[in-house]
Image (spheres, rainbow, N blue to C red):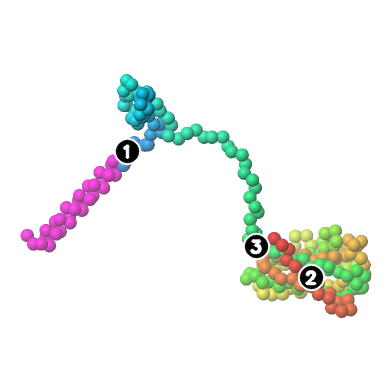
Amino acid sequence: MSVATVRRTGLTCLSLVVIALLVVLARVTASAPPPASTLEACINPGNGNMRLVGPGTACHTNETRVSWNVEGPVGPTGPTGPTGPQGADAGGPPFVWVCTPGNLDYSNNGNAEVSIFNGGSAPATLSTHFLAKNGANVSGGVIPTSNPVATYPGETGTNTVSLASRNTLILPFLLGGGTRATDNTMMASVEVTSDQPIVVGMQMANGPLNAVPCNALPR
């Protein structure tokens, strides 16, 4: 018999032994009883010795049998813990910008404009609301003392407009004449809401050109 034949025969026998062992282990594992839910023991009160026993094992005459559950009973619900600190905002939409003051008292219908730049990578769905001092949306309303009569731009109700990525929406309008604190038809601030990151700027002209502060609302 050649050496190669002997080696092949040896490897074959080894493989059969391994397979047989795996089958035996699988059977033993499958037939193994589930872990006990109760522990039992015999205690010798004279010397304090304790030995664990199975359910069918009797204790000696000088021993006392005891048993206990492996898992104890569920305890009562504990008190509610203190409220944790508020997590950091993820910085997602809506993105809200506000420009104020949006009007100058007794401005006598000077020119003004709001510029909105979409810095997102997708078209922005946005709304521009021209707000009176009491929060009323006066977009679409008549600009006080305008002659000829003009209306504020922007969206009414839940209407929105779309602005392509990296595009700028320019909204020209006239400044109303009057006093913001007493006229709830006169625009006091501009609010722009978008689902994409935006930058908003505003300027007005009543004699000299005036830049108006526009800021993203803190989250």
Residue type, mark 1 in image:
Ala
Crowding near pointer 2: few (<14 within 10 Å), some, many (20+)? some
Tell me which corner region of the image, top left, top right, bottom left or bottom right, holds residue 171: bottom right
Please name the residue that numbered disc 1 is placed on.
32
Tell me which corner region of the image, top left, top right, bottom left or bottom right, holds residue 58: top left
Pointer 1 and pointer 2: residues touching (CB < 8 Å)? Answer: no
Mark 3 falls on what kind of element? loop
Identity of the residue drawn at 82% across and 63% down: 131
Residue type, mark 2 in image:
Pro
Residue 211 percent location from the top left of the image: 81, 75
Judge whether 206 appears above or below 219 on screen: below
Counting residues from the start of the chain, the first of labels 1 and 3 encountered is 1
Residue type, mark 3 in image:
Gly
Kindly tell me whether residue 6 is visible in this rendering. Answer: yes
Identity of the residue drawn at 85% across and 61% down: 133
Please name the residue that numbered disc 2 is placed on.
213
Crowding near pointer 3: few (<14 within 10 Å), some, many (20+)? few
Counting residues from the start of the chain, the first of labels 1 and 2 encountered is 1
Magenta region: which residues?
1-28
Q: Main secondary structure of the magenta part?
A: helix
Total tally of numbered discs in the picture: 3
Mark seen at residue 91: 3
**Quarter of the image that includes the C terminus:** bottom right
Pointer 2 and pointer 3: residues touching (CB < 8 Å)? Answer: no
Q: Closest to the observer: 182 or 52? A: 52
